[in-house]
């Protein structure tokens, strides 16, 4: 039986603890990779002054978010530090049908949900050089209250432990350029393998 070609775009998942530099890496990947769609998550958390609705996140009420859950409009969703986060499914499907690489910056809970849908998704976890440096980065952001920052640090340990079980690729963000290079190589290898499968 002839194998049908998979012309849909692939999915790459970028995860990591708060303050590790995921968003910066994703922005660099968009510059470096061709034909890529960076997914914008929806959240119920408060928007900070420097964030832009529709660019950093789609900011919605909890009522609106829960209605979307009931209507099955999310590819994945999770509650993180008391706020809800989710990936709108329609945007992902549009991008994949257009043959684009879909880049998802999501947490471990969400990543496992996405992997169940897209078994060939590349799962990349960004690690801090050390717990001390992660604490300094979180403190330097100045975005979170002290108790929230402490909660995020505690959550980081659990997230990193889970990542070692579920992620194929672990990238340490000690040097940003090097971390981006590693992520580019992982994604390009995935794309190359897909092209070979289609040609084979």
Image (cartoon, grey):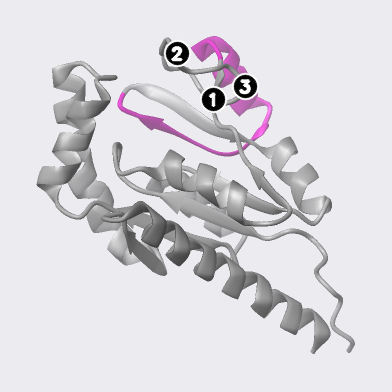
Residue 54 numbered tag: 3
Residue 57 numbered tag: 1
> Magenta stretch: residue 79 in it?
yes
Q: Which residue is mark 2?
A: 47
Q: Is residue 164 above or below residue 154?
A: below
| Residue at horizontal 79 percent and vertical 60 percent from the top | 8
Q: Give SS at disc 2.
A: loop
Please state the horizontal and vertical placement of residue 173, each as a whole percent of the image.
Answer: 31, 54
Mark 1 vs 2: CB contact within 8 A: yes
Quadrant in which the C terminus appears: bottom right
| Residue at horizontal 53 percent and vertical 10 percent from the top | 61
Of label 1 and label 2, which has the lower sequence position?
A: 2
Category of crowding for the residue at label 2, using alpha-carbon neighbours closer than 10 angstroms: few (below 14), some (14–19), many (at least 20): some
Point out the stretch of residues depicted in magenta: 60-81
Residue 52 visible in the current orientation: yes
Quadrant in which the N terminus appears: bottom right
- Taking 13 as reference, is 164 left or right? left
| Residue at horizontal 46 percent and vertical 51 percent from the top | 14
Please state the horizontal and vertical placement of residue 158, each as a whole percent of the image.
Answer: 21, 48
Q: Give SS at disc 1.
A: loop
> Magenta stretch: residue 34 in it?
no
Single out the residue that lies furthest toward the left: 132
Compute the Cα span from label 1 to label 3: 5 Å
Q: Nearer the viewer, residue 57 or 182?
A: 182
């Amino acid at each position: 039986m002839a194998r049908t070609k998979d012309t849909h775009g692939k999915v790459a998942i970028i995860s990591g603890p708060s303050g590790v530099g995921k968003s910066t890496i994703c922005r660099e990947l968009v510059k470096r990779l061709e034909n890529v769609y960076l997914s914008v998550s929806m959240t119920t958390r408060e928007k900070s002054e420097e964030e832009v609705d529709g660019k950093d996140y789609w900011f919605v009420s909890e009522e609106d978010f829960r209605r979307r859950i009931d209507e099955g409009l999310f590819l994945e969703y999770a509650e993180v530090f008391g706020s809800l986060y989710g990936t709108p499914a329609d945007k992902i499907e549009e991008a994949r049908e257009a043959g684009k690489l879909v880049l998802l910056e999501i947490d471990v809970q969400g990543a496992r949900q996405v992997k169940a849908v897209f078994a060939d998704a590349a799962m990349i976890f960004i690690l801090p050089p050390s717990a001390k440096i992660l604490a300094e980065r979180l403190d330097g952001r100045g975005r979170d209250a002290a108790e929230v920052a402490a909660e995020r640090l505690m959550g980081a340990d659990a997230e990193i432990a889970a990542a070692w079980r579920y992620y194929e690729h672990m990238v340490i963000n000690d040097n940003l350029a090097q971390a981006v290079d590693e992520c580019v190589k992982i994604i390009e290898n995935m794309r190359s393998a897909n092209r070979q499968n289609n040609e084979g």
